[in-house]
């Protein structure tokens, strides 16, 4: 019992310290508090699969789909001079759909995430806007009924579920630079798993990439802004050996870039399977899809 208590305490110490730093900074400065801000401080990274979003990515090669259901929302914001701090919550999942005949989705596997984040936004004028986001996320993965053969009363291809769990802390730095209608957001991130199953998974992982958007030639549609965008995301993790995965998106968003809207895109992914029950398998996928973007 003592060992379990120590492990639990170790997992929550870092997030608690971050929150204490957040509130102590606000109290000791001339701060303006905001409860339930209208806009999310840090927009989800489009190329990263482990971000909150709502939408579908369809893979024409086998008619399978990745279905995302989730949201990230800020609960509290604090403005201190040129810095804006926020505390938010994230709940999300994505499902692997292998069939949709008869208007019924056959879901093979699912990854679920929940946790929270603390984000700092610093506006410096000539050098752009700088974001630093800390996330603490619980991730678990499961095979579900779409991977079970009822007639044989057994898992398909005798593949049984892997007890997959990962609790990780993640730090991201993402400056935003704007020139006229063009906006560029490069980023780097690193994460440390505080608990993981299977044990062969390495604790440390890292990623980098960028997003770029520009106004479309037709700049308005039904009185809404139109933006063309591209996103590239490079990710390495020990699964158990360190390998590189790559994902990209090219698309168009209807609606203001940092506000509510709908995005249509084509995608390419190459690397370890994005569904954690199959993490050791290398795949290559072309896709077409859409996301509902929330502010």
Image (cartoon, grey):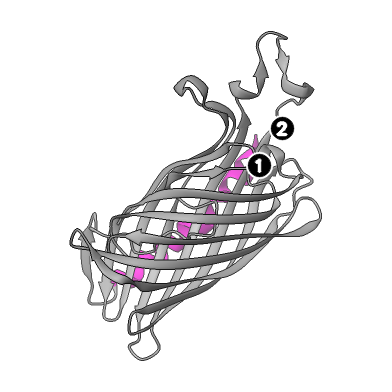
Q: Pinpoint residue 222: horizontal percent, then vertical percent.
A: 19, 58
Please name the residue shown 64% across and 58% down the image: 192
Mark 2–mark 1 contact, CB under 8 Å? yes
The disc placed on residue 162 is 2
Q: Residue at x 29, y 75 (%)?
A: 28
Q: Secondary structure at mark 1?
A: helix
Image coords of residue 186 (percent x, y): 51, 75
Measured in 3D between alpha carbons, the distance from the residue under mark 2 to the one under mark 1, in whole angstroms, is 9 Å
Secondary structure of residue under mark 2:
loop
* Range of residues picked out in magenta: 1-27
Taking the image as shown, residue 137 lies to the left or right of residue 282, namely left
Residue 33: give x, y in percent of width and height.
22, 65
Residue 257 appears anywhere in the view: no
Q: Around disc 1, counting alpha carbons within 10 Å, would you say few (fewer than 14), some (14 to 19), or many (20 or more)? A: many
- Residue at image position (60%, 69%) is 208
Image height of 58 relative to 204, above or below: above
Mark sitting on residue 276: 1
Q: Earlier in the sequence, mark 2 or mark 1?
A: 2
């Amino acid at each position: 019992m003592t060992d379990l208590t120590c492990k639990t305490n170790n997992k929550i110490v870092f997030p608690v310290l971050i929150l204490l730093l957040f509130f102590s900074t606000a109290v000791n400065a001339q701060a303006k508090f905001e409860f339930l801000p209208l806009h999310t401080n840090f927009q989800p990274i489009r190329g990263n699969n482990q971000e909150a979003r709502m939408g579908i990515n369809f893979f024409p090669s086998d008619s399978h789909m990745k279905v995302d259901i989730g949201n990230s929302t800020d609960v509290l914001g604090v403005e201190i001079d040129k810095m804006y701090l926020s505390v938010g919550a994230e709940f999300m999942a994505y499902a692997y759909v292998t069939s949709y005949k008869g208007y019924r989705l056959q879901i093979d596997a699912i990854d679920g995430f929940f946790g929270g984040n603390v984000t700092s936004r610093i506006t410096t004028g000539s050098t752009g806007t700088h974001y630093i986001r800390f996330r603490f996320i619980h991730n678990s993965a499961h095979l579900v009924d779409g991977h079970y053969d009822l007639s044989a009363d057994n898992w398909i291809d005798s593949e049984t579920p892997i007890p997959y769990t990962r609790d990780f802390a993640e730090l991201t730095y993402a400056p935003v630079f704007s020139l006229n209608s063009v906006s560029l957001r490069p980023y780097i991130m690193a994460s440390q798993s505080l608990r993981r199953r299977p044990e062969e998974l390495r604790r440390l992982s890292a990623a980098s990439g960028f997003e770029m958007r520009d106004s479309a030639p037709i700049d308005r549609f039904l009185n809404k802004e139109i933006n063309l965008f591209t996103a590239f995301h490079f990710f390495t993790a020990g699964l158990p050996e360190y390998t590189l995965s790559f994902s990209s998106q090219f698309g168009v968003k209807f609606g203001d870039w940092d506000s509510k809207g709908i995005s249509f895109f084509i995608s390419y992914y190459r690397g370890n399977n994005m569904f954690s029950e199959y993490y050791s398998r290398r795949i290559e996928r072309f896709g077409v899809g859409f996301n509902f973007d929330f502010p």
